[in-house]
Each structure stands twice: as structure tokens, then as C-alpha cells.
Image: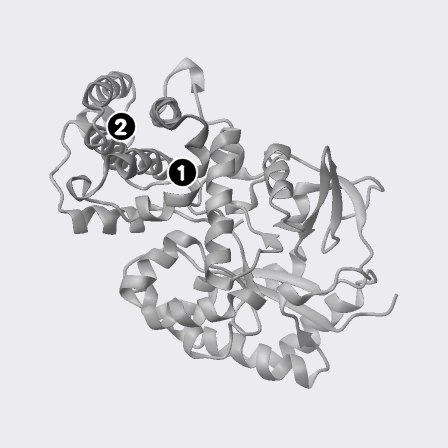
Amino acid sequence: MNVRPEIGIGLHFPQPSQGIERECYTPFAQMDILSKAMFVLPPTLEVMLADRDPWALNIMQANMADNGVASPFVPVLLPDLSQTDKRIVIGVGIKRFGDITGGKPRFFWPPETAIDYMTLKVLVEHGIEGVFCSPEQIRLYNGEDADNMPTRIRLNGGDILAMPYDFGFSSSLAPRDNADVFTEQVVWPALKKLNNGYPLMGWADVETFGRRTGGEKFIQYLLNNALPDHGIQPVSINRIDLSDVTTAEGVIAERTVQSLVPRTNVGGKLTLRDALIFLNTSITGIAAGEFGLEYEKKMIAHFGEAFRNPEPPSSTPELSLISSKVSALVALTSGVPIRDARDAVEHLKNAGLGVQAGNLWEAFLDLTREILDPTQPGKTIFDMASGLLDETAEDILLRKQNSCTFIPG
């Protein structure tokens, strides 16, 4: 098969931090980059941009149909979730993609590229064609390297493509002085190694470019000038034709992402994650009991609204209950999980379930008495939890936006 002179460059947009809109989001929206690069726009980031930089958000949304890749609503590690929670966060992420584009996503990016077979099963149920991952997460049956090789993973009820990026190319994808030299010395040699009819795929964090002087200018020139001048075309990922692409057969290596090492009951001791999982599981039981067979449907339909619902007194009991579950999931991804856990219990109380809320918070606090606070020698997580400060509704929403961590794989 001849070399296919096409390239897919994927960009992760990081979660909000001080000044990051000016350094990352706005420049990439202003320049003609997102019409030629794949990108992941996590819905939690979308919520933040709607307030801080709606113009940049509009540009991103306008390019999602061609170049956007779906992701779960909150950037939680999917293999760590129950199957019900997987269906909820994946379902609401796919729903949001459809709300923006008017169509269904073809491809999916799991946070940190963390995947397992039960996650793939949910993606297949949603009609997802492929999931992006790193090469080391795939084992080909023929024993060859999985670099840039779409690999068909067989599942009961269907199959899905695991779509690894090119590790060497992705590692080299960083601001350079000369995009033409980069194309000649890095891109073309990587392309010539391929013979499967699949574009050269590489992914990078936007911060790699946005936080360095001129970085966004490099990627803009690369996509709009250097690559086309060398006979290489950037592809629109959602328009790519996979019918003539040679695929391999293989399996995924579950829990191969560094963040998925066992994190509970280390040495027989409780961790904060154990307490947060207890809280999330308990709220699942309460919410599922209240909503019955409509539980997942209601969660998916109102998840985004519940995420934006920082002030329980202005909410309905139903939305407060959904908000309780959303806050419990956010706590699993959060930089300030104790406060998100407290939010979850407050929402539960405002749903008219004060007794359950009180009992759950006391049980959660009892667990935190046994967990040492790594930031304060001699203190426990209970000491941190009992010292929570009052916050305004605006403070709570801003914290929730800023606390969802997303670490690209």
C-alpha cells in the first residue's frame, strides 16, 4: 500500500487555571488551527469558557462536527467507575457532543486514555467507531508494535477500533524554530514507515504550545503552510474514510495507565479515595432508589444542568438529587474533593432527604478520622473536613470548574 500523505494532529485543551485562557484557548481559536487539527473539548471546560471566553468557545464548537472528539462530561478515570457510572458520564458526554454538532460522534477520547473492556462495551453500545489510546495499551496478535496501527478489539455484541497515536511523532510534536525543517526531518520519515493507509496520528497538550512564546504560531504555520507545501494534508478526523485502511487484530492491556495503579487500602489503611468511593456509591443507591428505572435516563438528561447548579435553594428536589450525584462524581476528579463531597451531601439535604444526608455525612466523616492528611503532618482528613469555610454560589461553581483535573495520556 502506498504512503498516504495525510496527517492527524490532535490537541488536548487543558482544564482552567489562572491566565490559561489568554495563553491557550484564545490564541488557538483566533488562528486557523482548529479547522485542521483534531481536538478534545471536555464539557467541564466548555462550562468555564461559556463564562470566561464565549468567543473562543463558539469557534471550538463550530469546528467540532469535523474535528471534535467526544469525551466524558467529567474527566474521571473510566475503569475506576461502576458500569452504571460509566454509562452516565459517557452518555452525557456523547449527548453534549450531539447537542453542539447535531450528530453522533465517531470517536472518543477517555481521560488519560484509561480504558478497560467494560468501558469499550459502553462505547460500542453508543455506536462509537474508535477510541484513541497510546500504543503501549494494545497487544497485537502478531506480536508487532502497535504504533499508529488501528486495532480491532472484538467484544460480545460488537467490536471497536483502538486507535493508537504514533509515539515517536507525538513525542516530537513541540514548538520548533522551523516548521518546514520539522516536516522534512520528522513528519516525512514517520509517514514513510506507514503502509496501512492510515494517516499519521499525533497528539499533544495545547499547553505545550500555548505556554511557550510563539508556540501557537508554529502549529498554525505547520498546519496551514509547511505540511501542504510538502504535499501533506491535515485530515478532518470525523470525515476520515476507514474503509480502505488496513487494521490489525489484538487486545487491550487493561489498567496500563500509570494513574490506574491500585490506590485503595494500601497496607490495609484507608485512603481518601476509599472515602470518596463510599460517598459516591452511597449516593448512587439513594438516587437510584428514588428514581427507580428512570435513574440513568434522568442523570444523562440533566447532568449538565446539575453541574451548573451551585445553589441548592434555587433548585428543585429532583435537580438537587441529580446534583448530589454529580458532585460525588466531581469529587473523584477534584483538587478539593472534601468540599465537593460536602456539596454532594448539601444537595442531598436540599432534595428533601435530610436524614439520609446527615447519616451519610457522619459516616463519611468517621472514615476521614482514619485517613492522614498528607499536607499536614499529624493531622487527618477529618481535621480538614471539619474546617470547611462557607462559600457563595459563585465560589462553588468556580471551584467545581477549576477542580476537575484532566491529565492527558
Q: Is residue 183 left or right of residue 197?
A: left
In x, y percent, where is residue 64? 51, 65
- Residue 81 visible in the displayed image: no
Q: Amino acid at mark 2?
A: Asp
Residue 318 versus residue 32: which sits nearer the camera?
Answer: 318
Which residue does the image show at 27% across and 60% down from the upper left? Answer: 18
Write down the quadrant of residue 264 in the picture.
Answer: top left
Q: CA distance from mark 2 to mark 1?
A: 36 Å
> Which scheme is used to colour this image of the protein?
one colour
In this rendering, is residue 22 above or below 137?
below
In this rendering, is residue 302 above or below 67?
above
Residue 306 versus residue 17: which sits nearer the camera?
Answer: 306
Q: Secondary structure at mark 1?
A: helix
- Residue 39 visible in the displayed image: yes
**Which residue ends up furthest to the left in the rendered image?**
390
In x, y percent, where is residue 376? 22, 31
Q: Secondary structure at mark 2?
A: loop
Q: Amino acid at mark 1?
A: Lys
Write down the quadrant of residue 316 in the picture.
Answer: top left
> Mark 1 sits on what residue?
298
Write down the quadrant of residue 1 in the picture.
Answer: bottom right
